[in-house]
Amino acid sequence: MDAPRCDQTEAWAALEGHYEAHGRELDLREAFARDPGRFASLSFEAPELFADLSKNLVDLATLKFLVDLARECRLEERRDAMFAGAPINSTEGRAVLHTALRAPRGQGPFSDEVHGVLDAMLAYAESVRDTAASGIRHVVNIGIGGSDLGPQMAVPALDAFVHPGLQFHFVANVDGHDITPVLRHLKPAETLFIVASKTFTTQETMANAHAARAWFLENGGTDTARHFVATTTNVKAAAEFGISTTFGFWDWVGGRYSLWSAIGLPLAIAIGADNFRALLAGAHAMDRHFAQTPLAKNLPALLGLLDVWYRNFHGFTSRSVAPYHQGLKRLPAYLQQLEMESNGKRVDLDGAPLPYGTSPVVWGEPGTNGQHAYFQMLHQGTDVIPVEFILVKRPTHALADLHTKLLANGLAQSQALMLGKSSEQASSERAPTASKALDPATLAKHRTFPGNRPSTTLLLDQLTPRSLGALIAMYEHRVFTSGALWGINSFDQWGVELGKALCSDLLPRLASGDAAGLDASTAGLLTRLRA
Ligand code: F6P
């Protein structure tokens, strides 16, 4: 698509001027004092989500300039091309159509194929859920990256909806410490293994699948065909492995966008067909929002633009995600792959090196745990790190008192980041644990918080299959937005290749000890590992 690079647009120049005049020095406390309508004008609604952007270092003018930038970079045309199935993954010549996986029957591209597999997979999931007939008590998903992180994140997130007679395990790492403790407590007759791999060639997954099959047979397992299924685009390789039950998907589904495909099978078994369809419906509602809502009110687009603002104008290099819901404990890991594998790129679509930064580092832990670990740095460290709070209004447990405390903590953190604490305030307070030997002025400096640290709060009414679907789809489109503005290919991952190739070279060397031609460090380490 013929679109200018973001830094060569008029809007970029306007944003640079705006940043110098109003952005760099924007003070959130003053902005709220000046504008009583700030919360209302900077909060947005999308399906299943309410987003408060008012504690960010923006004003309405910033958003207007950012929307101008999106238009000049032809974000809407790029988005429409994705939905229409254009081969926007240019380096692999592929369409990017995860949105087709959640389009209602008859409405999206490849609808017959998509709904054919979906129906078959959900019927199979229901048969496993009939535990009296299936005899299955444990489901082990063997997969890595996009063939692991989605179900691994979503099963605990939707714990309240999970079949009570089934337990789910996720094995990813090519480290025997991953699969060994999982297998220790299992019985072959009660276990279903799902070998999940788009390519069915990934070293880690294949090694674990072989280990699982060996364990199954050594421990008296019979009927491998009933206890091993595969989810893959490479049905032939799965058959060669000896797996006859296979649920397929297509090369236009990127690994990190594949939760909605057959890769979602463990989740479908966990929550059942109706709930899995609700997850898809929530994601589809967000797709419609992204496709149809004007950019000025389009939540994924606005968050993607905010990411550009922070990365390229403020120079912030990371973003912390703090889900105040224990079920979302794996969300930061999921988002790391989604965002950093998609947008961790250094050249534009023509291969020219970029003069600006792309993907931020995305990281985090559930609240309140993070508060007792790294939040110290967020409040008083030298770097400004925008934080994303995810709060869920209604829990699915009955411990109302705990939930109120959780919400109060989430609100308090975003408030504390913004308000800070002046040295006058710090001096006027008692600090019972402080050293009596230190002079009060020095102590106050240690106890001062600069404040004015930005955060976004995303609010869900309840964490359900539908709202989780909408939340994840929102993140996908947000990553699309920032990637489109940066002019990169968000859908390949060549950066993973070099390590894989070098690993193939080192594998036989670890056995033989041949260190010829290696750099001195690698040769030295190899020798020590073999000693
Ligand atoms: O890490 C690279 C990658 O290709 C991811 O994009 C993908 O999700 C993962 O490996 C697993 O690949 P596969 O599903 O083919 O086993």
Image (cartoon, rainbow, N blue to C red):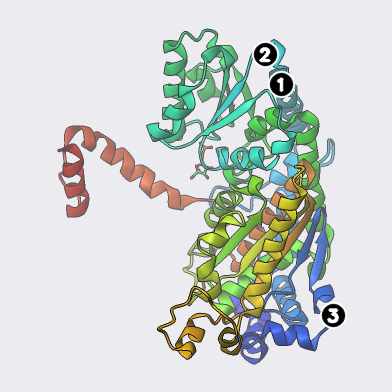
Residue flagged by tag 1: what amino acid is it? Arg
- Residue 449 is marked as none
- Mark 3: C-beta under 8 Å from nearest atom of ligand 1: no
Residue 252 appears in view: no
Q: Earlier in the sequence, mark 3 or mark 2?
A: 3
Q: Earlier in the sequence, mark 2 or mark 1?
A: 1
Residue position marked by numbered label 2 in the rendering: 134
Q: Is residue 155 visible?
A: yes
Q: Residues within 10 Å of mark 3 (few under 14, many from 20)?
A: few
The residue carrying mark 2 has its beta carbon less than 8 Å from ligand 1: no
- How far apart are labels 2 and 1 at the CA level? 7 Å
> Which percent across, then down, holds residue 495?
44, 53
Figure check: 448 above or below 234? below
Displayed quadrant of residue 503: top left
Q: Are the residues at dot 2 and dot 1 in contact (C-beta closer than 8 Å)? A: yes
- Label 1, secondary structure: give it: helix
Q: Nearer the viewer, residue 15 or 236?
A: 15
- Amino acid type at circle 2 is Ser
The N terminus lies in quadrant: bottom right
Residue occupying image coordinates x 44% and y 81%: 436
- Front residue (pair 237, 386): 386
**Crowd tier of the residue under label 1, counting other residues whose Cα lies within 10 Å: few below 14, some 14–19, many 20 or above:** many
Check disc 3 and report the residue beneath it.
37
